[in-house]
Image (cartoon, rainbow, N blue to C red):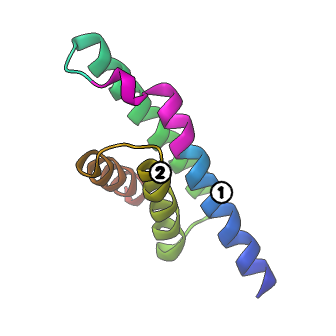
């Protein structure tokens, strides 16, 4: 049981770190419809999804592990102040990327 809890904590910590790294790549101050900013957002999303996919492959996350990662990511994004609709769409994109 201790191994499962340690693994769960690692997944949650990675989800939090992933959200924080995303916020460094695309901060709330960047939000606009400017073409440069949209490219920056696209790069941040791609980098986040790629890191999550690598983590998922290395750890061989199952359904529950992916859900835990998504939940930790989502809650950290909320704590960083992103809009709910943005968070929901980004988290869904992230989880779809992990499933594919």
- Vertical placement of 98 versus 27: above or below? below
Q: Residues within 10 Å of mark 1 (few under 14, many from 20)?
A: some
User: Which residue does the numbered mark 1 point to in the structure image?
Assistant: 13
Query: Considering depth in this image, is 63 or 72 the residue closer to the camera?
Result: 72
Could you tell me how far apart the alpha carbons at marks 1 and 2 are, in whole angstroms? 14 Å
Residue drawn where x is 23% and y is 50% of the image: 85
User: Which residue does the numbered mark 2 point to in the structure image?
Assistant: 79
Number of marks in picture: 2
Residue 32, quarter of picture: top left
Element on which disc 2 rests: helix
Is 33 displayed left or right of 2 in the figure? left
Residue 31 has which mark? none
Residue drawn where x is 30% and y is 11% of the image: 36
- Vertical placement of 22 versus 64: above or below? above
Q: Are marks 1 and 2 in contact (CB under 8 Å)?
A: no
Residue 11, quarter of picture: bottom right
- The numbered mark, 1 or 2, whose residue comes first in the sequence reads 1
Q: Residues within 10 Å of mark 2 (few under 14, many from 20)?
A: few
Where does the C terminus fall, quadrant-wise?
A: bottom left
Give how far across and how far down residue 14 sits, in percent.
63, 53
- Vertical placement of 88 versus 48: above or below? below
What's drawn in magenta, residue-wise? 19-31
Is 83 displayed left or right of 44 in the figure? left
Give how far across and how far down residue 93 sits, in percent.
32, 50
Give how far across and how far down residue 13 sits, in percent.
65, 57
Give how far across and how far down residue 53 sits, in percent.
51, 49
Where does the N terminus fall, quadrant-wise?
A: bottom right
């Amino acid at each position: 049981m201790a191994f499962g809890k340690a693994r769960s904590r690692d997944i949650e910590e990675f989800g939090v770190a992933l959200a924080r790294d995303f916020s460094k790549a695309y901060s709330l101050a960047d939000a606009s419809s400017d073409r440069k900013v949209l490219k920056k957002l696209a790069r941040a999303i791609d980098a986040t999804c790629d890191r999550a996919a690598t983590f998922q492959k290395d750890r061989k996350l199952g359904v529950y592990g992916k859900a835990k990662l998504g939940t930790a990511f989502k809650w950290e994004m909320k704590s960083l102040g992103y809009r709910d609709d943005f968070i929901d769409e980004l988290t869904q994109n992230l989880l779809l990327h992990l499933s594919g």
